[in-house]
Amino acid sequence: MFSINKINELNKSEFLSIFGNIFEKTEWIAKKVFELKPFKNSEDCFLKFTEIYESSNKKKILKILNAHPDLAVEKKLTKDSANEQLGANLNECSEEEFLEFSRLNKEYKNKFNFPFIIAVKGKNKIEILKIFKKRIYNSNEKEFEEAKNQVKKIALIRLSQIIEIN
């Protein structure tokens, strides 16, 4: 955990190595946030990350959404995604669950053109499958907004694991 004072003292390289994956494989947001230092407090830092994300155009948001891995079946995960999926026991799927995730991932991507995204912290694989099965019936517009919100939740969870809340 870093204090806001320590974060304000980081050089660009250090900052990017710590915050470059707050938004999955989207270092450009961290680069922009770095330019906004110093931060008054942790809330100010969180706000800067979310403002840059939320002010991004739809094309950039889609790129961010597509940087996320498929749940339970993706083999090449970032350290953050791997830890999050482990926490939800997505690595312990039965053959039936694995096939269900595979089918849903494919069907969802075909429908929405981005992977299913959910902040898995505090959820288990059964809850996630239940939500997955429900959200696949959303309209494109509704699901785009839901995925966008889930990405923001994931980013805030990741930030809260790095920054001391003051």
Image (cartoon, rainbow, N blue to C red):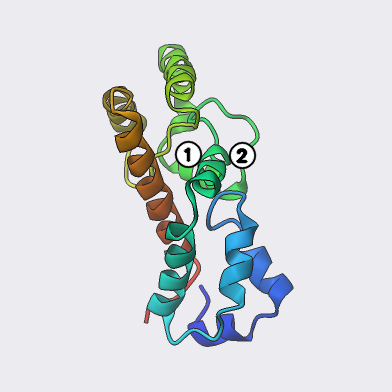
For the question of whether residue 19 can be seen, the reply is no
Q: Residues within 10 Å of mark 2 (few under 14, many from 20)?
A: some
> Mark 1 = which residue?
85
| Left or right: 33, with 13 as reference point | left
Q: Residue 133, position in %: x, y? A: 30, 22
> Which of disc 2 and disc 1 is earlier in sequence?
2
Please tell me which residue is depicted at 35% across the width and 49% down the height of the picture.
149
- SS state under label 2: loop
Amino acid type, label 2: Leu
Q: Quarter of the image holding residue 66?
A: top right
User: Residue 40's spot in the image, x, y percent?
Assistant: 44, 87
Q: Residue at x 28, y 32 (%)?
A: 127
What residue is drawn where x is 61% and y is 77%? 35
Q: Residue furthest right?
A: 13
The amino acid type of the residue labelled 1 equals Gln
The answer to whether marks 1 and 2 mark residues whose Cβ atoms lie closer than 8 Å is yes
Image coords of residue 114 (percent x, y): 49, 32
Q: Is residue 122 above or below residue 98?
A: below
Give the labeled residue for mark 2.
Answer: 77
Vertical order, 142 against 38 (above or below): above
Is residue 77 rendered to the left or right of residue 11? left
The C terminus sits in image quarter: bottom left
